[in-house]
Amino acid sequence: MPRTPASSTPSDIDATQFACQNLPVTTIDRPSAPVVDIDAVRMYRQNRLRAEMASRDVAGVILSDAVNIRYATGARNMQVFTSRNSPSRYAFVPVEGPVTVFEFTGTAHLAEGLPTVQEVRHARTASYVAAGPAIADVERAWAQDMADLILERCGDGVKVGIERMNAGAAIALAGHGFEIVDAQEPVERARAIKSNGEIECVRASLRATEAAMAAMEHAIRPGLTENELWSIFHQHVIAAGADYIETRLMTAGDHTNPWFQETSDHIIEPNVLIAFDTDVVGVHGYYSDFSRTFHAGPAAPTARQRELYAIAHEQVHHNMAIIRPGMTFEEYSLEAWDLPEEFAGNRYYLSAHGVGMTGEYPYLYHHQDYVEWGYDGVIEPGMTLCVESYIGRPGEAEGVKLEQQVLVTETGTELLSLYPFDDTLMGSGLT
């Protein structure tokens, strides 16, 4: 039987024919986005970071992670490229005073007009690719640049946080007498609590991703490759303003078990499961992270496919229901859904995790993993969390991936990801 989209808002944009053979004609859905005061969001984020720095006596941080640069300053530039070629752009954020972004050659104009940036300089790329055999000299020059700036803005011998810096540059900077610490803690703790404006950014990202998923679901049919089907989602989400997709996690049939097999040229067979995790760095740079599993048709799902789906659905909804402000991470682990032993071997590595501009603090573990991997903390209002489930018995042909994105409120949680579950896989009593 033919599939119909779970949710779609047809637009009057002209249809676009894909170049891949036999792909259907699609239209680009452009869902209305909430109005966001993005400058207010940027200032909130920078102030959050500075407050976390101050509480740890950190005088300044040097950020090289492209997502963290965007979080702290709003400056966006070639996030994937600069994450691989580091440090080719970076930012210095003092606990108070002017913020400086060091931009990649020829791109200084991208940070113009940002209320969170007072100065833009050209970056000195301290990498072997850029410097060749002179790398040590370049690293020392980079460290001298940064030391001069830190002395000017913060003073001598202060505590400075750095992240993702090549060893030579970090060692050279430490040689100038600063106390070097890891910037991850203040950055992650800052990112964990969202403003109302950030939540509107999250909603905008999710609505665009859901429209893209509807287009992809509508196109499901046996005979397509995983790559061809995934490209439909890609086209729609990028057209809506997303940056990129972090992972390749859309698989079909025996590629769904175990999880974390990547999207490929594997052909989608009739009547198999298709599992998908969005992992979209989306509109306004905010992460849209939810998972759904579909059935390819044309026949009805088997009893076992429905059973796997029902178990995953139960896990996600149980764990969503227990989340409450003030709950410790250990309490969550103890109250979380008890994973049946037959699925434990292929369990998802987390029960839930923080999410903002990407996946972030905290990680919440299954209780069988808490002793080895877990750490304690408190679930707080303003956190956004993704509640995970993967159900696939080791050695079995297929598995089911489901995930929901929620906001922690003063009284419990609010569901943020609104994409419906698959009608053909929903068993009796599931909502």
Image (spheres, rainbow, N blue to C red):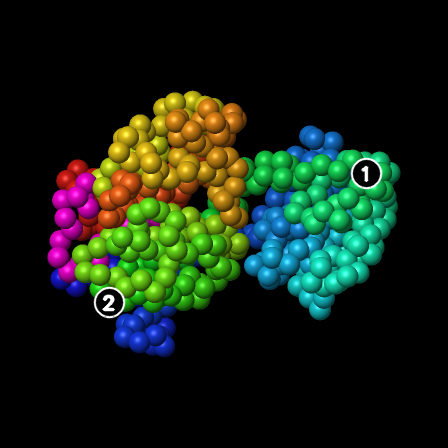
* Badge nearest the viewer, 2 or 1: 2
Q: Amino acid at mark 2?
A: Gly
Earlier sequence position, callout 2 versus callout 1? 1
Q: Residue at x 71, y 59 (%)?
A: 128
Q: Secondary structure at mark 2?
A: loop
The quarter of the picture where the N terminus appears is: bottom left
Q: Which mark is residue 83?
A: none
Q: Residue at x 72, y 63 (%)?
A: 130
Q: Is 66 left, or right, of 256 in this rendering?
A: right
Residue 339: in sight, yes or no? yes
Bounds of the magenta span? Answer: 291-307
6 part of magenta stretch = no
Q: Position of residue 266 (x, y in %)?
A: 31, 62
Q: Is residue 43 above or below residue 16?
A: above
Q: Is residue 226 above or below residue 347?
A: below
Q: Amino acid at mark 1?
A: Phe
Q: Quadrant of residue 272?
A: bottom left
State the residue in front, 191 or 42. 191
Q: Position of residue 221 (x, y in %)?
A: 23, 64
State the CA–CA distance, disc 2 to disc 1. Answer: 60 Å
The residue under label 2 is 223
State the residue in front, 79 or 180. 180
The residue under label 1 is 178
Q: Position of residue 194 (x, y in %)?
A: 53, 40
304 part of magenta stretch = yes
- Classify 10 Å Cα crowding around label 2: few (below 14), some (14-19), many (20 and above): some
Q: Residue at x 24, y 37 (%)?
A: 311
